[in-house]
Image (spheres, grey):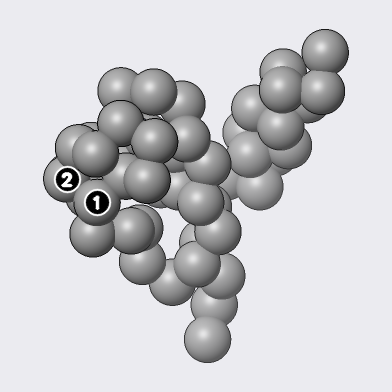
Amino acid sequence: MQKKYWLCTICGDLHVGVNPPEICPTCHQSKEKYVEITFEEFEAELAKFKK
Ligand SMILES: [Zn+2]
């Protein structure tokens, strides 16, 4: 199955998978708060955490 990249718009949690998590593990908001992002955006978000 195709992997997709997801970003929680509330807390910035990143998720890789076919679907976003039912509940964000960090801020406990529902999956409607996740938006699908591109791999490039995903890598840019990851880079922020590494700083
Ligand atoms: Zn969240």
Does 30 sit left or right of 37 as displayed? Answer: left
Look at mark 2 in the image and give the residue it sits on: 30
Whole-number angstrom distance, CA of label 1 to CA of label 2? 5 Å
- Please say whether residue 8 is visible from this viewpoint: yes
Q: Amino acid at mark 2?
A: Ser
**Dots 1, 2 in contact, CB < 8 A:** yes
Which element is circle 2 on? Answer: loop
Q: Quadrant of residue 33?
A: top left
Q: Position of residue 42 (x, y in %)?
A: 63, 39
Q: How many C-alpha atoms fall within 10 Å of the one at disc 1: few (<14), some, or many (≥20)?
A: some
Q: Residue at x 23, y 59 (%)?
A: 22
Q: Position of residue 34 (x, y in %)?
A: 31, 41
Q: How many marks?
A: 2
Mark number for residue 12?
Answer: none
Q: Quadrant of residue 10?
A: top left
Of residues 27 and 1, the one nearer the viewer is 27
Q: Amino acid at mark 1?
A: Ile
Q: Position of residue 23 (x, y in %)?
A: 24, 51
Does 5 sit left or right of 18 as displayed? Answer: right
Does 28 sit left or right of 49 as displayed? Answer: left
- Residue lying farthest to the bottom in this orientation: 1
Q: Is residue 1 above or below residue 3?
A: below
Which element is circle 1 on? Answer: loop
Q: How many C-alpha atoms fall within 10 Å of the one at disc 2: few (<14), some, or many (≥20)?
A: some
- Please say whether residue 37 is visible from this viewpoint: no
Does 40 sit left or right of 29 as displayed? Answer: right
Q: Residue at x 71, y 32 (%)?
A: 46
Look at mark 1 in the image and give the residue it sits on: 23
Q: Is residue 28 above or below residue 2?
A: above
